[in-house]
Image (spheres, helix red, strand yellow):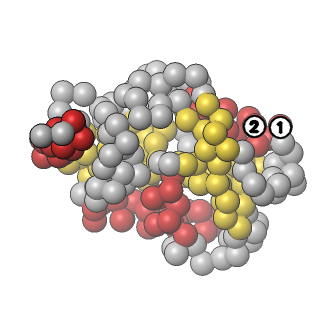
């Protein structure tokens, strides 16, 4: 048995043992609520929507067809985690390709955990001249370790316990972003 087969077997077992915190229908309902709130606030702004790679890709894709107003779409890639389970310094892998100067920007990401990455992204976009930067996350973890007291995204789908999560864009060591629903890894 190859190392890759052993690794995939461990990844499958981890998924089988995980606790489902929100099933696919619950996630869909949360995204519907987010889309309604975003539409109410941004439908006349012609915003630039920036998906944060890789985690924000799934949420962005699921949000887009629910946003029935003109918008531009682009992406950026900044991360503290990579495929690790703990965050490090923020790494900028790709800046937005679309100029943000004078624009209303909506940053879409999978999760607000501590918030260092999201704050860094917002600060960078403001320093690059964005007129307004709003944030949307599928999940906000409940804990007292936020980078700034009271830190919240402008649009949030679900609040969940402080566990290691995967599914609906979030990954476990690079895997299971495609899992329908939100899961907590057993023991983490």
In the figure, is residue 136 to the left or right of 134? left
Which residue sits at x=64%, y=54%? 75
Which residue sits at x=47%, y=31%? 81
Q: Position of residue 120 (x, y in %)?
A: 67, 32
Q: Position of residue 84 (x, y in %)?
A: 40, 29
Which residue sits at x=67%, y=64%? 73
Write down the quadrant of residue 86 in the picture: top left
In the figure, is residue 157 to the left or right of 180? right
Disc 2 to disc 1: CB gap under 8 Å: yes
In the figure, is residue 26 to the left or right of 117? left
Q: Residues within 10 Å of mark 1 (few under 14, many from 20)?
A: few
Tag 1 residue:
127
Q: Position of residue 123 (x, y in %)?
A: 74, 35
Residue that lies at the very extreme toward the bottom in this rendered image: 68
Q: Position of residue 159 (x, y in %)?
A: 38, 43
Q: Residues within 10 Å of mark 2 (few under 14, many from 20)?
A: few
Tag 2 residue:
124
Write down the quadrant of residue 139 in the picture: top left
Above or below: residue 81 compared with residue 56: above
Q: Is residue 74 visible?
A: yes
In the figure, is residue 151 to the left or right of 92? left
Which residue sits at x=41%, y=52%? 169
Above or below: residue 17 compared with residue 71: above
């Amino acid at each position: 048995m190859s190392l890759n087969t052993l690794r995939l077997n461990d990844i499958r077992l981890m998924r089988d043992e995980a606790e489902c915190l929100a099933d696919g229908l619950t996630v869909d309902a949360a995204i519907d609520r987010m889309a309604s709130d975003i539409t109410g606030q941004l439908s006349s702004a012609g915003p630039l929507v920036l998906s944060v790679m890789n985690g924000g890709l799934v949420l962005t894709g699921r949000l887009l067809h629910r946003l029935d107003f003109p918008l531009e779409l682009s992406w950026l890639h900044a991360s503290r985690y990579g495929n690790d389970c703990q965050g490090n310094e923020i790494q900028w892998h790709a800046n937005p390709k679309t100029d943000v100067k004078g624009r209303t920007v909506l940053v879409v990401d999978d999760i607000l955990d501590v918030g260092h990455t999201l704050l860094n992204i917002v600060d960078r976009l403001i320093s690059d001249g964005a007129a307004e930067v709003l944030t949307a996350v599928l999940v906000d973890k409940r804990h007292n370790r936020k980078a700034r007291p009271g830190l919240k995204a402008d649009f949030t789908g679900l609040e969940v316990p402080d566990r290691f999560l995967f599914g609906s864009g979030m990954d476990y060591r690079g895997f299971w972003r495609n899992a329908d629903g939100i899961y907590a890894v057993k023991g983490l």
